């Protein structure tokens, strides 16, 4: 399964978001996902299996619990793939930063001018 096929599913993306905050028990993940998406516990388990089988998540036993965490390697591979497209948004973000700075300077100048007029 291609990485974007794995991440194309909103349930799996949500599970990765939960795991990005740190290791979580399967039951905790299942409770959140069941509440948010209305799917069964076996359905959540299947999504966890897809993430695990495709290298996005790791699992370790802790007594009767299964603790899941993010495996960053596939995300690094996606980042490498995205690198060739960054130029499309980097220039726009740089331009946005310039415009925000310009607006900040203009507001400060207007405030300074107002204070001078008030005094």
Image (spheres, helix red, strand yellow):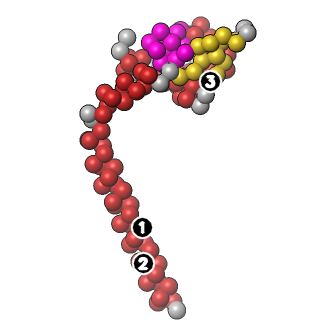
Would you identify the image quadrant in which residue 101 lies? Answer: bottom left
Badge 3 or badge 1: first in the primary sequence: 3
Q: Which mark is residue 104?
A: 1
Q: x and y percent of residue 5 in the render?
A: 38, 17
Mark 1, secondary structure of its residue:
helix
Which is in the foreground here, disc 2 or disc 3? 3
Q: Is residue 90 visible?
A: yes
Look at mark 3 in the image and give the residue it sits on. Answer: 23
Crowd around label 3: few <14 · some 14–19 · many ≥20 (10 Å): some
Badge 2 or badge 1: first in the primary sequence: 1
Q: Which mark is residue 110?
A: 2
Marks 3 and 1 sit apart, C-alpha to C-alpha, by: 41 Å
Q: Nearer the viewer, residue 35 or 47?
A: 47
Q: Nearer the viewer, residue 35 or 107?
A: 107
Residue at the image point whose x is 62% and y is 12% from the top = 60
Which is in the foreground here, disc 2 or disc 1? 1
Q: Nearer the viewer, residue 12 or 78?
A: 78
Mark 3, secondary structure of its residue:
loop
Crowd around label 1: few <14 · some 14–19 · many ≥20 (10 Å): few
Marks 2 and 1 sit apart, C-alpha to C-alpha, by: 10 Å
| Residue contact at pointers 2 and 3, CB within 8 angstroms | no
Range of magenta residues:
46-58
Prevalent SS, magenta region: helix
Q: x and y percent of residue 63 in the render?
A: 73, 9
Q: How many marks?
A: 3
Residue at the image point whose x is 33% and y is 29% from the top = 80
Mark 2, secondary structure of its residue:
helix
Badge 2 or badge 3: first in the primary sequence: 3
Marks 2 and 3 sit apart, C-alpha to C-alpha, by: 50 Å
Q: Locate the N terminus and report the quarter of the image it occupies.
A: top left
Q: Which mark is residue 116?
A: none
């Amino acid at each position: 399964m291609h990485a974007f096929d794995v991440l194309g599913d909103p349930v799996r993306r949500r599970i990765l978001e939960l795991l990005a905050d740190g290791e979580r028990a399967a039951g905790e993940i299942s409770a959140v996902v069941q509440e948010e998406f209305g799917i069964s516990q076996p359905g959540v388990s299947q999504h966890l299996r897809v993430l695990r089988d495709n290298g996005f998540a790791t699992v370790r036993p802790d007594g009767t619990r299964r603790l899941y965490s993010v495996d960053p390697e596939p995300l690094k591979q996606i980042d490498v793939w995205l690198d060739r497209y960054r130029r499309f948004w980097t220039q726009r973000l740089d331009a946005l930063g310039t415009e925000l700075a310009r607006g900040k300077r203009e507001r400060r100048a207007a405030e300074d001018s107002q204070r001078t007029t008030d005094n």
